[in-house]
């Protein structure tokens, strides 16, 4: 049996400014390709300014109509649009992104020309030549900043969205881009203060810890910081604010998902089947990394006498499968097809731990306002984590799910104002709304 | 027990689900001509606007019905033979029942306007209406909407998002002023106008003009104006969808007549939701309730009766909500457009004209009766508790924060409201 689906009517035409923005972005991509084929090597500085300038101005032009428009939800035409709803354009972008990651991770020499345009900036920030990871970091940060601006414009009526987007932009630029670069310049270890074990899994591996401790006082502090964040801050903050304190306020992966990934948030799978797969996968990854870490320590303690190379093999495979393939290639490359949080939902071990706290020991919930849900489905549709929010809301139940990253979009798109993210007393958070007349 | 339900809207489906919860053995069949599966009627506008696809509006995945042993039949019920307890379907099949629940919903009102059956003239209630609207609004540039209610504004927003110019003919002198007090009606009217919708107050449709292809070309109003358009939306309310019962002895008026147990004039036949009409509604309550919320509440009550726990319907403390473009509206308790002599009302409005608050209370003892919120979200559980406990107005104003439901970091207005209230009070006692 086939339910009726509606034809594509005339989608609202893009404004001239948005067309200009898209054109500038396309020029930026073209220039990047030209730079990659060698021109970047011979003229790094002009190409650097050309490419970043085009990307930034493209983003600004694209965002202006959002800033100028009246406040309100801007989802018109999303389901009728090839870019947003898994159409041909979306598949093209998915292949482009995935391909870029594959080249970046395993064939970086093809990007030589593009890497070289980052040399001037790399010397200023890090006092050394650029490499593929600096190129990637620069593009990543640019994407977060540009698309963050677009997100703020789109949700300019919501202070929650504005503040949390500024937060992810700040942490990406400061803690995940500038600070590690400056540390290198100062001959210190390149350390990311906004990433912790198990997301940055090597921070609790014996090799990394040995290296940091030997590098001096700052290194010792870094080890201390990593431990405190993983063991003390994570449970405490998650108890008080839910996992959102990290996933949609601090984390770099979250930053990209919330900004670059926003146009694709509606593509996450909401089925029960997907939820089952999600729970198996994300917790398996968690077990995998805990096991790997434990083995490495056991091995280090016994100086490799019991396990030989086995623990090293574990960490190599984890790095390849989870660190590169899952979090990078699939995590971002599949945005246009599977939504913006594929990695966070199915793969991130940090999200798994935070989720366990959030589900079982936290003050955070999304409160459903009494019996006001009209089951329209906007909340579920725009949940990037694939939570069927409506299933709870229409029963008057609060939404307390391990995977919820607290982005707050369900609350914004709800046409009846039924949902509110909040941290209240832990007690009673699972109690649903029951009409006074129905109470026995 | 063999239960057959006509209609797979919120009332029919909520009844089916709740019967299944109470009785694991009952046979449950739901018949609908509209769609294979339950979808949320309230979301039709979002399909048109491209916020969602039809599949997103289905609150349950398709496997849900089989798993819960709820049989779904896609068919039109032609006649009801209540003597033999049999339904005849248009496809020739017949279905027997032990208990029949009619939840056939509504159809848009038409008032015999000349030209109301032209091409390009329609209401918006069903999925079929939405598909028709999709076809009717291809490549058009201007539309007229007749009636300034909730479906009217939805239609306006839908058309507006496709860059179609919209004029709304509103019979009253303010927007939705048969429901809203003057101030709220003005706030909402201004907001709608601000989005580029042209509102014509004190204006009624007189005639719809045709072109030579039997298609709408424009409208004439009672004020003598003539507007050209390629589409007319008729949104002057809805009425019970009961034409398939015409040949039957089932007692009907505007809707199927029921008592507080949703029992009709014939044993083992029940009716609920939009299509039901209470014989003796409580004073102040409408005889026909046409809301999503009431459909759901009626269904919850009815399913208890069907399963042997006979329960009278009590809709409790009134509440409703809506959204006018970006402006959210919530109401709790009794707030009528005219304030009666025994009642007092305190109204606050933000200078930006996008946030407003009203509380009505008894003039004698100051106990509250109801709230209106515009651009403000408020906790239902708190509003209901206060209204039920008849809290004094001063207490309510001082404790508004307790019920505040706006998103975190939003500007909160409870202090502004309380300052305004107590200044007002002081001003009055000083006089």
Image: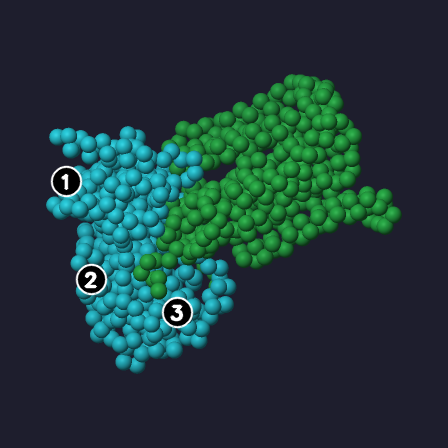
> To which residue does mark 2 refer?
B281
Q: Position of residue A31 (x, y in %)?
A: 63, 26
* Inter-mark Cα distance, 1 to 2: 37 Å
Identify residue for label 1. B223
Left/right placement of residue B140 relative to residue A279 reads: left
Q: How is the image coloured?
A: by chain
**Camera sees residue A390:** no
Element assignment for label 3: helix
Is A341 positioned to the left or the right of B255 in the image? right
Residue drawn 15% across the image and 33% down it: B429
Q: CA distance from mark 3 to mark 2?
A: 25 Å
* Chain rendered green: A
Q: Secondary structure at mark 2?
A: loop
Q: Is residue B248 above or below residue A192?
A: below
Give the mark nearest the N terminus, 3 or 1: 3
Specify the subunit that label 1 lies on: B
Tag 1 secondary structure: loop
């Amino acid at each position: 049996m086939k339910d009726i689906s509606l034809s594509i009517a005339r989608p609202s035409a893009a404004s001239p400014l948005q067309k200009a923005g898209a054109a500038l972005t396309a020029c930026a991509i073209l220039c990047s390709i030209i730079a990659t084929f060698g021109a970047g090597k011979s003229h790094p500085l002009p190409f650097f300014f050309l490419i970043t300038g085009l990307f930034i101005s493209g983003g600004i032009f694209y965002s202006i109509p959002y800033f100028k428009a009246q406040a309100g939800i801007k989802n018109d035409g999303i389901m009728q649009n090839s870019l947003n709803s898994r159409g041909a354009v979306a598949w093209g972008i998915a292949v482009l992104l995935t391909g870029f990651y594959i080249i970046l991770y395993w064939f970086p020499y093809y990007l030589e020309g593009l890497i070289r345009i980052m040399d001037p900036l790399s010397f200023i920030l890090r006092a050394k030549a650029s490499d593929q990871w600096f190129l990637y970091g620069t593009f990543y940060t640019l994407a977060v900043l540009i698309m963050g601006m677009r997100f703020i414009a789109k949700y300019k009526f919501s202070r929650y969205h504005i503040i949390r987007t500024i937060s992810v932009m700040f942490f990406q630029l400061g803690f995940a881009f500038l600070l590690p670069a400056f540390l290198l310049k100062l001959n210190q270890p390149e350390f990311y203060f906004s990433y912790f074990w198990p997301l940055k899994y090597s921070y609790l591996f014996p090799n990394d810890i040995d290296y940091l401790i030997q590098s001096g006082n700052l290194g010792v502090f870094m080890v201390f910081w990593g431990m405190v964040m993983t063991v003390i801050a994570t449970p405490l903050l998650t108890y008080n604010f839910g996992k959102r304190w990290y996933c949609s306020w601090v984390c770099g992966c979250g930053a990209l998902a919330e900004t670059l990934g926003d146009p694709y948030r509606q593509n996450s799978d909401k089925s029960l089947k997907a939820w089952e797969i999600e729970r198996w996968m994300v917790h398996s990854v968690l077990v995998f990394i805990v096991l790997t870490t434990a083995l490495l320590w056991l091995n280090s303690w016994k100086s490799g006498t019991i396990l030989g190379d086995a623990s090293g093999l574990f960490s190599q495979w984890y790095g390849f499968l989870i660190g590169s393939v899952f979090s990078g290639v699939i995590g971002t490359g599949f945005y246009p097809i599977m939504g913006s949080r594929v990695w966070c939902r199915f793969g991130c071990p940090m999200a798994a731990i935070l989720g366990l706290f959030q589900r079982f020991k936290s003050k955070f919930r999304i409160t459903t306002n009494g019996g006001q849900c009209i089951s329209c489905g906007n909340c579920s549709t725009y949940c990037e984590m694939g939570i069927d929010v409506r299933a709870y809301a229409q029963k008057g139940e609060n939404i307390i799910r391990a995977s919820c990253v607290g982005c707050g979009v369900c609350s914004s798109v709800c046409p009846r104002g039924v949902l509110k993210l909040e941290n209240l007393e832990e007690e009673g958070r699972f109690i649903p709304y029951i009409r006074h007349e129905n109470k026995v | 027990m063999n239960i057959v339900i006509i209609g797979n809207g919120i009332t029919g489906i909520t009844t089916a689900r709740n019967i299944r919860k109470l009785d694991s053995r009952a046979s449950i069949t739901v018949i609908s001509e509209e769609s294979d599966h339950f979808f949320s009627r309230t979301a039709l506008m979002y399909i048109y606007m491209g916020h969602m696809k039809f599949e997103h509006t289905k609150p349950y995945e398709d496997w849900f019905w089989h798993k819960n042993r709820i049989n779904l039949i896609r068919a039109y019920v032609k006649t009801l033979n209540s003597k033999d307890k049999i339904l005849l379907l248009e496809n020739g099949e017949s279905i027997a029942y032990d208990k029949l629940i009619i939840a056939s919903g509504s159809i848009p009102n038409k008032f015999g306007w000349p030209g109301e059956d032209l091409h390009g003239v329609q209401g918006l209630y069903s999925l079929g209406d939405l598909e028709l609207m999709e076809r009717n609004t291809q490549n058009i540039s201007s539309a007229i909407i007749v009636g300034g209610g909730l479906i009217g504004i939805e239609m306006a927003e839908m058309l507006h998002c496709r860059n179609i110019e919209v004029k709304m003919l509103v019979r009253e002198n303010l927007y939705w002023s048969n429901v809203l007090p003057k101030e709220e009606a003005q706030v909402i009217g201004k907001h709608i106008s601000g989005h580029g919708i042209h509102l014509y107050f004190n204006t009624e449709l007189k005639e719809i003009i045709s072109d030579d292809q039997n298609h709408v070309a424009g409208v004439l109003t009672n004020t003598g104006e003539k507007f050209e358009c390629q589409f007319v939306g008729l949104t002057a309310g809805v009425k019970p969808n009961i034409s398939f019962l015409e040949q039957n002895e089932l007692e009907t008026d505007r809707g199927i007549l029921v008592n507080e147990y949703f029992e009709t004039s014939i044993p083992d036949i029940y009716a609920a939701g939009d299509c039901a009409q209470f014989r003796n509604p409580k004073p102040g309550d409408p005889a026909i309730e046409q809301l999503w919320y009431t459909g759901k509440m009626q269904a919850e009550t009815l399913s208890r009766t069907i399963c042997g726990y006979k329960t009278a319907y009590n809709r409790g403390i009134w509440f409703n909500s809506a959204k006018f473009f970006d402006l959210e509206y919530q109401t709790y308790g009794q707030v009528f457009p005219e304030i009666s002599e025994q009642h007092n009302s305190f109204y606050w409005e933000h200078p930006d004209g996008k946030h407003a608050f009203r509380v009505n209370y008894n003039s004698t003892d100051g106990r509250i009766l109801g709230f209106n919120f515009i651009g403000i979200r408020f906790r239902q559980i708190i509003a209901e508790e206060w209204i039920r406990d008849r809290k004094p107005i001063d207490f309510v104003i001082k404790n508004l924060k307790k019920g505040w439901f706006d998103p975190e970091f939003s500007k909160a207005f409870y202090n502004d409201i309380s300052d305004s209230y107590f200044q007002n009070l002081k001003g009055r006692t000083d006089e």
